[in-house]
Image: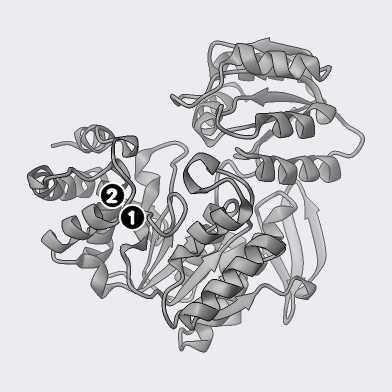
Amino acid sequence: MTGQEAIAYIHTYNWEKHEPGLHRIRQLLRALGDPHKGLKFVHVAGTNGKGSTCAMLASVLQEAGYRVGLNTSPYIMTFHERIRVNGEMIPDEALANLTERIRPIAEDMEEHPTEFELITALAMLYFKEQRCDIVVLEVGLGGALDASNVIDCPEVSVLTAMGMDHMGILGTTMAEIAAAKAGIVKEGGAVVSYGGCAEADAVFRSVCGERGAALREVDFVRLQRVEVSLDGAVFDFAPYQGLCLPLTGLYQTRNAATALTALEVLAAKGWNIPEDAVHRGLANVRWPARFEVLGKEPLFLLDGAHNAHGVRAAAESLSVLLPDRKVVMILGVLADKDVEEMMDRLAPLAERAFVIRPDSPRAMSAQTLCAMLRVRGVEAQECVCAEQAVEQALNAAGSGGAVCALGSLYLSGAVREAAGKLL
């Protein structure tokens, strides 16, 4: 089996064919010797900011001298991004070998594991064999019934910014969604919450109280002197001063504050995280497609904002970083998001839009999205592929203009690849 054959096999099993639950992943991992039992974790759930927060945590822990596993989803450019050790993606050979070990066990199960469950099991095996000191583990969807929640009590559970998303699966109210996310809270565990959403905060406090978990909400009063530009941010988070973060976007310093609070919880548990490791880790973090600057003449931004909450944050960053300036947009969205609110936020900032259909069965057609934009007074044009959209957006913007691509992470990889050819 090659790496590509392994990926093709994994992609065969869609999560939509199965009822949610942890019974399959537990059975699969048990047959593999429960590799996760010997690992320590930072477990991260939330609506937005999960990936960025995970990347910051992993970078700082690596700078502190630890061997760090990182498991995130979805990927932007290549499947291998989902499983990393000290920043290095899982190699093809390891991916193929581990899949060959897992496959006969999975196929012998009465109910075959889902794609995400296969990836979770593969990651656990890889992290164990790589002798990781700690694993930063991102929840795929929700929390309580997500395959990642098969782990025992982590070193710390992190709940990032909350918003309304995946309502068809997690619930139609913020309280229901928060309850699903709070499923990662374990008895007697340590929990860090981004906070700021009253309904979700009430749920998190209640669940932590019921389970005897120590809850620490991020104190954003400590976040001071935030200077954000297209090159990144410089900020203080008392007592840390002069922290540099190469990630653009106003929201990233708040994600950093969440990561720093979680690192303080780890330090209180005995993990050695010197201040210079914090500075180096944040300065070295890389996380694509999150208000990423792909080019400067013209300015070309790529952001993975894929729901109303994320689009609000992206719109705020555009308004502050590019004041009194409209941008040419490349847009593609999934139909099951709150697209009306997303377009309400983006339309006032758009000079014009080039629209494509993301590579997902849940994607909204370009024709439908164009119609929604035109109703809002935005000139919108359908494009057949990302390369056409990027080329036309660049021509429309001109050398002194600005382009911003956003709306779905399923769009990001294709746009990033096309921009690499044309910029």
Residue 319, x across and y down, in percent = 84, 41
Q: Residue at x 80, y 63 (%)?
A: 226
Identity, as a three-letter code, of the amino acid under mark 1: Ala
**Disc 1: which residue:** 147
Which image quarter: residue 338?
Answer: top right
The one nearer the camera, 207 or 181, is 207
- CA–CA distance between discs 2 and 1? 6 Å
Q: Position of residue 419 (x, y in %)?
A: 58, 26
- Residue 370 position, x and y percent, is 68, 14
- Disc 1 element: helix
| Closer to the camera in the image, 418 or 139 | 139
Pointer 2 with pointer 1, Cβ within 8 A: yes
Residue shown at 63% from the left, 57% from the top:
161
Sequence order check, earlier mark of 2 and 1: 2
> Which residue is identified by label 2?
117
Query: Residue at position x 55%, y 44% from top?
Result: 288
Q: How is the image coloured?
A: one colour
Left or right: 142, with 200 as reference point:
left
